[in-house]
Amino acid sequence: MSSSVSTISDLIGREYKEGFVTEVETDTFPPGLDEDVIRALSTKKNEPEFMLDWRLSAFQRWQEMAEPSWAHVSYQPIDFQAISYYSAPRSVGDGPQSLDEVDPKILETYNKLGIPLQEQKFLAGVAVDAVFDSVSVATTFKSKLAEAGVIFCPFSEAVQEHPELVRRYLGAVVPAGDNFYAALNAAVFSDGSFVYIPKGVRCPMELSTYFRINALNTGQFERTLIVAEEDSYVSYLEGCTAPMRDENQLHAAVVELVAMKGAQIKYSTVQNWYPGDEDGRGGIYNFVTKRGACRGDDAKISWTQVETGSAITWKYPSVLLEGDRSVGEFYSVALTNNCQQADTGTKMVHIGKNTSSTIISKGISAGRGQNAYRGQVKILKDAENARNYSQCDSLLMGDRCGAHTFPYVEVKNPTATVEHEATTSKIGEDQLFYCRQRGLSEEDAVSMIVNGFCKEVFKELPMEFAVEAQALLGVSLEGAVG
Amino acid sequence: MLSVTNLDVAVNGDMILNELNLQVQAGEVHAIMGPNGSGKSTLANVLAGHPGYEVTAGSVIYEGQDLLQMDPEERARQGVFLAFQYPVEIPGVSNVYMLKAAVNQIRKHRGENELDAVKFLKLVREKMKLVDMKEEFLHRSVNEGFSGGEKKRNEIFQMAMLEPKLAILDETDSGLDIDALKVVAQGVNELRDASRSIVMVTHYQRLLDYIVPDYVHVLAGGRVLKSGGKELALELEEHGYGWIEDQTAELLETRA
Ligand SMILES: Nc1ncnc2c1ncn2[C@@H]1O[C@H](COP(=O)(O)OP(=O)(O)O)[C@@H](O)[C@H]1O
Ligand SMILES: [Mg+2]
C-alpha cells in the first residue's frame, strides 16, 4: 500500500515550471548589511530624509532583536551578511519608466509566467505591478486607474510622488520594530506596491502585484501598502515565483492594509515560490508579516491565501478590528510536499464592539511536508458581542508528513462568542479507489478530493486566481453543477 | 462475460481467496453467499481492481480480456461496476459533480460526446426516480452524512447512471430495512437485461426473495464450496452457515 501512497504525493508534486532563470545585466549590491548599505539604498532611490531616518531606526531595532524560534519549522541559521540587499536589472535601475523601455527579456519572463504586461494582452480587468528582484519594472493600466482617482504604483514611485501619504501610513499597521523580519524589511525594503483608493471609490479593476525573484544570493524585501478611504472597495491579488536554485533565498515582505469607515479590502495571494527539491535542497524562505487594520466602523478586511511554494513559510495575515461592527476574514490553503515546512495562520484582534471574524484554514501535507496552523483570536475588554468562528482542517497524504494545530484564544469580554472546529483526515486509498472505480483517473481523483477539501477557500478567490490556484494544486475546476 | 479461474488472492501476505472459480454469462444474476470473513468483499474488490489485494495465481477474463492487467478506472470504463459494501465519504465534492465526471469519462471511453448540463440533469432525474432518491442528495457531498440506507441507494443510483455490463453488488442489502430493501431490489431488477450480468454478494437469503438469482454460490474459507440454483440459498437458510462450515472443516481435514 505504501507504493500507492507515494503515487499520491507524486501526483500532487507537479514539476516546478517557473524555475527558469532570466539572464539580465544587474546592478547588485555586494552581500552584507550595515548602515552604509542602507544609506546607499536610500540614496539610490533618491529618498527624502524621513525615509532614511525610518530605515536607520528600524535597523537599530533589528540589531537588538533575536530571530524568533517559536514557529514549528527548522532550518540552518540564515547568514544575513551573505545576502545582497539590492539587485535590479540594469535597464530599470533609474526608476519607473514606460513599458517600451523595459528590457524585452524581462517582458518575456513575465510572458512565460503567464503574466503578459502589455495591457491589451492581459486579462481584462486586472492591473499589474511587476516586481523583479528589488524593483518594480512595470505597472499597467495606471492611467485608467488614475481617472478613478486610484493610485497604483511602485512603492518607490509613491515615495517620490505622494510622500505625504507614505509618511502618514508607512508603519501605521506594522511598525518598524514589530518583529525581527518586519524590522529587517523596514530597514532594507527596496520596492513593492502602493495603492490608494479615495473615499467612496470602488476600484474599477482588480489590482495585482507579481513578485519574481531572479538574482542569486539576493533577498527580496518588498513592502505593500494599501489604503482604502471611507466607503471604498478594492480587490488586490498577489502572485510569486522564483527560479530553482540549490541555495535558499530569503523573502521577507511586509504588507499593511488600512481600511477606513465602511471600506472593504480583499487581499488574495497565490504563493508559488520555489519550494526546493525533493531532498529539501534550495527553496525560498518566506518570512512575511501581513496585517490589516479596520480603522473605522463597518470596515472589512479579507485575506485569502493559497500557499503552495517556499521551503519555509512563516506567515500570519492578521486583522485589527478597531471599528465597531468591523469584519475580519482569513481563508487559507497551505500545501506542503517533500520537505516543505509551513507555519501559517492568522491573528484576529477584536477591539471594537460587535466585531466579527471568520477563519477557515485548510492544510494539506504530503511527502515529508510539515504543516502547522497557528491562530490567535484575541477579544479585548471593550469588544462587546464580538464573534469568532474558526475552522482548521488538515488533510494528510501518506504517513511521513505532519499536521499541527496551535489555536490560541484570549477572551477579556464575557459577551464574546468564540467557536473553534478542527478536523484531520487522510486521503485514503479507499477514497481514491472509489473514484477510480467510477471511471476517474487517479490524477483526476486526487484533484477532485483535494479540490473538494479546499472548496470553501477557493470560492473566496477572484475568478482568475481560483483557476490558477486550482491548476497549482494540480486540480481542475469543479463544474458549474457543483 | 466473466471467467474466474483458480484465483488465489493474498492481503499483506495472508492467503484469502483460494483457487476460486466462477463463470458468469451475459444476462445472468449470480448470488455469492457466505459467512462473514469468507472472502466475499475480497472477491468483489479484486474484480474491481483494488490495489490493496495481491493476486498470486489464477486468471480473470472479462469479455475476452485479461481483467487483472487493467487499472481500476479502465475496468470501470469497460463496464465493471462495484457497489461498495462501505461507500466512502468525500467531503466538499458534490455527488452530482462526481457523477458527472464519471459519466463523462465513461462516455468518452465509449466514443460518445460529453453530456451537457441539461441532458445530464434529465438523465439524473430519471434514474433518481428508480431508487426513490431526493434531489437534495445531488448537491450534498459524496456520501457525507448519508445514513447507511442512503449510501446504498446512492450506489444503486450511480449504477443506474453508469449502466455497467458487469455489476457487482457487495452486501447492498445489509443494514436496509424492508422498505429500503424493496426499493433497492426494484432498482436492480429494472437494470436486469440480457446483456448485463450481476454478481450479488449477500450474507442473507432475504435479498434473494426480491432479486431472484439464476445461480447461487456458497463461499467459505476463500473458495466456492458449493454452487447451485436459487434453491441452494433456501437450503443454506434452512441449515445455516454452520452447515457450510462443517463441510469446510471436513474438506480441510481431507486435505491435511
Ligand atoms: N485489507 C485487508 N487487510 C487484512 N485482512 C483483510 C483485508 N481485507 C480482508 N481481509 C481478511 O480477509 C478475510 C475475508 O474478508 P472479506 O473479503 O472482507 O470477507 P467478507 O466480505 O466475506 O465478510 C477476512 O479474514 C478479513 O479479515
Ligand atoms: Mg464483505
Image (cartoon, helix red, strand yellow):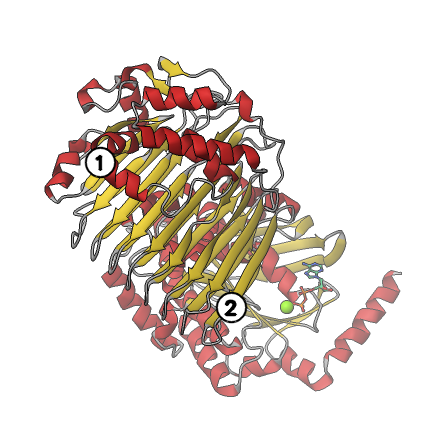
The image quarter in which residue A382 lies: bottom left
Q: Quadrant of ligand 2?
A: bottom right
Q: In percent of the image, x 81 and y 75: which residue is there?
A: B246
Which amino acid type is marked by label 1? His
Residue placed most toward the observer, B92 or A340: A340
Q: Is residue B197 above or below residue B65?
A: below
Residue at which label 2 appears: A411
Dot 1: few (<14), some (14–19), or many (≥20) neighbours within 10 Å?
A: some
Question: Is A388 displayed left or right of A137 in the figure?
Answer: right
Residue B206 vertical position relative to residue A58 in the rendered view, above or below: below
**Side (left or right) of A297 relative to B2:** left
Q: Chain of mark 1?
A: A
Residue A209: x and y in percent read 30, 37
Residue A296 screen position, x and y as percent: 29, 60
Q: Position of residue A380 (x, y in %)?
A: 46, 65
Q: Which residue is mark 1?
A: A162
Q: Secondary structure at mark 2?
A: strand
Mark carried by residue A367: none
